[in-house]
């Protein structure tokens, strides 16, 4: 689509009202689902971090699908509870590939002036920016996954202790 400029009718401005209705229904469904959370008064809302994680882990879901289709059996690996510095580039290569591929196709479409649809420009820009943000998130500093000082403390005092630890580091 980006190179040839051939765009299905779904990528038109005329589809935005229908798309907004669909997104509203999805959001209302999410609010209904949240009624069944353990502490819904504190946990309700837009969980954008979970959505970002869902986007970030797509390569691993694709590899898992490949394992299922190829009937490859591997043992279950327990998730590490300590920070691993070797996984710093976990999101780097797949998202560099995506940003490069979409950016190149987009650039070719702009160079040959084949893209006449503004929604296609917005989609391409969004994909490239999200890929770059996911790459950058690999270099953000996060607190340790497990802090022994927080063991046995209440939630409020644990959060206070965590904030103090973040400001001292």
Image: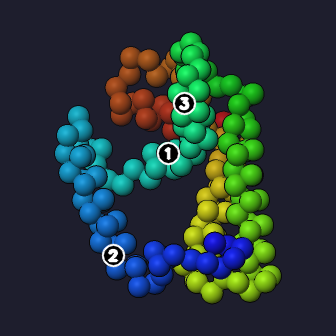
- Determine the residue positioned at 46% across, 50% down: 51
Select label 1 or label 3 by which is in front. 3
Determine the CA span between mark 1 and mark 3.
21 Å
Mark earlier in primary sequence (1, 3) = 1
Q: Which residue lies under the disc numbered 1?
A: 54
Mark earlier in primary sequence (3, 2) = 2
Residue 129 appears at what percent x and percent y? 65, 63
Q: Is residue 41 left or right of residue 157?
A: left
* 10 Å crowding of disc 2: few (<14), some (14-19), many (20+): few
Q: Which residue lies under the disc numbered 3?
A: 69
Select label 3 or label 2 by which is in front. 3
Q: Is residue 129 left or right of residue 14?
A: right
Determine the CA span between mark 3 and mark 2.
35 Å
161 or 88: nearer the viewer: 88
Please indicate, yes or no, whether residue 24 appears anywhere in the rendered image: yes
The numbered disc on residue 18 is 2
Residue 42 appears at what percent x and percent y? 27, 44
Mark earlier in primary sequence (1, 2) = 2
Give the quarter of the figure containing the C terminus. top right
Please indicate, yes or no, whether residue 164 appears anywhere in the rendered image: no
* 10 Å crowding of disc 3: few (<14), some (14-19), many (20+): few
Residue 13 appears at what percent x and percent y? 46, 84
Residues tagged 1 and 3 counted as in contact (Cβ below 8 A): no
Select label 1 or label 2 by which is in front. 2
Work out whether 9 lies above or below 100: below
């Amino acid at each position: 689509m980006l190179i040839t400029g051939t765009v299905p009718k779904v990528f038109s401005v005329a589809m935005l009202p229908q798309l907004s209705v669909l997104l509203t229904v999805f959001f209302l469904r999410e609010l209904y689902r949240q009624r069944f959370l353990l502490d819904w008064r504190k946990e309700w809302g837009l969980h954008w971090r979970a959505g970002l994680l869902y986007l970030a882990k797509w390569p691993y879901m694709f590899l898992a699908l490949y394992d299922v289709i190829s009937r490859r059996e591997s043992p279950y690996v327990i998730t590490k509870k300590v920070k691993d510095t070797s996984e710093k580039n976990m999101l780097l290569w797949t998202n560099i590939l995506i940003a490069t591929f979409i950016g190149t196709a987009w650039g070719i479409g702009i160079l040959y002036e084949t893209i006449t649809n503004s929604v296609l420009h917005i989609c391409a820009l969004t994909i490239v920016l999200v890929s770059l943000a996911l790459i950058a998130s690999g270099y953000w500093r996060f607190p340790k996954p497990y802090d022994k000082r927080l063991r046995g403390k209440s939630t409020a005092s644990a959060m206070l202790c965590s904030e103090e630890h973040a400001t001292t580091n």
